[in-house]
Every structure is written in C-alpha cells, then in structure tokens.
Image (cartoon, helix red, strand yellow):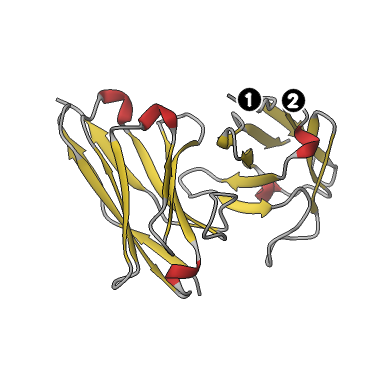
Amino acid sequence: SYVLTQPPSVSVAPGKTARITCGGNNIGSKSVHWYQQKPGQAPVLVIYYDSDRPSGIPERFSGSNSGNTATLTISRVEAGDEADYYCQVWDSSSDVVFGGGTKLTVL
Amino acid sequence: QVQLVQSGAEVKKPGASVKVSCKASGYTFTSYGISWVRQAPGQGLEWMGWISAYNGNTNYAQKLQGRVTMTTDTSTSTAYMELRSLRSDDTAVYYCARAPSIAVAGHFDYWGQGTLVTVSS
C-alpha cells in the first residue's frame, strides 16, 4: 500500500516560514490535501488539490507538489498556527492514505 | 452553513458493536459522500471508508473489511458507521467528514466534532 512520510516535528519562530514535507513515491502524480488539527479539535482542511485554499484559510498557507515530495508552506507563522498537520492522498489503487502527521511548534 | 453533528460518546465491551451517527445540514446531502476517519489516543488519522450519499456505494479500508458497515438515511440526511467485534485497539475518536464527490473518497472539506468510542471490559 502507498505510504506517506512526514517529519514528526517542525519548529519555527514567529514571523518566519514553516515548511512541512510529505514524501511518497511519485507523489507529484497524485493530488495532495493538507489538514490542520489543534488539540481536542477535529481536523480542518487547509489545502486541497496540492495548492488550492478553502475559503477562510489565510493566504499565508500554500502548497506545492512535485516529484516525490509535497510541501505545505506557512508564511509569517503565528502562535495560532501551532498544531498537527496531516497530508492525505487518494487514488484508485490505495484509496485514502494519511501521512503520520507533523507537530508544528511555534517557538 | 455546513454542519456535521455526531452522536455522543460510547463505552462498549470487547466483542460488542457500536453504531455512530452523523447528521448533516446546510447542504444537499445526496450531492456528496461521507467518509469515516478514526484517531486512536495520541495517534494519527486512519481512514475507515467512504459512502456515496447519492447511490449508497461504499468502499472500506481493507483492514476493516468484514467488521464495518456504512449506511445513509437520505430522509434524515444522516450517515451511520457500525463497527462490530470491537477490540481494545478500536478505542478512538471517530469522525465523519464530507467528501465533495459522489464517486470517490477524494478529500474532506467539513468534519464532524468526533465521537469517542471506548472499548473496555
């Protein structure tokens, strides 16, 4: 089955840029979606189809996908961005797969 | 506004079954799918399966085949997830999530608040 690999943790200072990666075999050929989950809350979709933002999600959140790595980029990081982030793909052979999640810490 | 409201917490004994409901509002229920995703304590997200609210087609995670059944009641815009032969490692928060497609699971744009299911003797 298809495997998505995320770093367990990423740390960033306020106002800087955080990049969270999601690795998978030829992931660039799939559509990648990203979710933010704060403690005790349900996940929230922040990026879909690699780089689209749902309404209400700040422009500071962006996504890219190429080769074997997809990346969620959060610019001008704020304390409120501290959360777990999950990447997710779907395809006809592996159905829905989530990455293991990355804990973003704002220093 | 789109809302998915789930049923309350459950405590079950090993070997029992649980059925969690997810009532949708704020959109045309039959124009979307519903997926179920669970999260064990301190762990990541695990996809359980998907059902099309349009035609009832389902697709279950291989790991849960034979133990899970997903259904919908279009008259009440409610989706259900039943998990049988419960084990302690089924203890988790169970989420329903809307999938913007009636044909495939895809991605999930709105989520329920979650239902804690505890399996303990």
Name the residue rendered at 80%, 55% in the picture. Answer: A60
- Amino acid type of the residue tagged 2 in the rendering: Asn
Q: Which residue is mark 1?
A: A3
In the picture, which quadrant includes the C terminus of chain A? Answer: top right
Name the residue rendered at 37%, 43% in the picture. Answer: B94
- Residue A75 x/y as whole percent: 83, 48
- Residue B9 x/y as whole percent: 25, 47
In the picture, which quadrant includes the N terminus of chain A? Answer: top right
Name the residue rendered at 48%, 58% in the picture. Answer: B33
Name the residue rendered at 68%, 62% in the picture. Answer: A54
Relative vertical location of residue A55 with respect to residue B38 in this rendering, above or below: below
Q: Are marks 2 and 1 in contact (CB under 8 Å)?
A: yes
Q: Quadrant of residue B24?
A: bottom left
Q: Is residue B97 left or right of residue A27?
A: left
Q: Quadrant of residue A88?
A: top right
How busy is the neighbourhood of tag 1: few (under 14 within 10 Å), some, or many (20 plus)?
some
Marked residue nearer the N-terminal end (2 or 1): 1
Q: Is residue B35 left or right of residue A2?
A: left
- Amino acid type of the residue tagged 1 in the rendering: Val
- Residue A9 x/y as whole percent: 68, 27
User: How much space separates mark 2 and mark 1, taking CA atoms?
Assistant: 8 Å
Could one spot residue B104 in this view of the protein? yes
Q: Which residue is mark 2?
A: A25
Disc 1 is attached to a residue of which chain?
A
Could one spot residue A20 in this view of the protein? no
Residue B103 vs residue B36, the one in the foreground: B103
How busy is the neighbourhood of tag 2: few (under 14 within 10 Å), some, or many (20 plus)?
some
**SS at circle 1:** loop
- Residue A47 x/y as whole percent: 71, 52
**SS at circle 2:** loop
Disc 2 is attached to a residue of which chain?
A
Q: Is residue B95 left or right of residue B13?
A: right
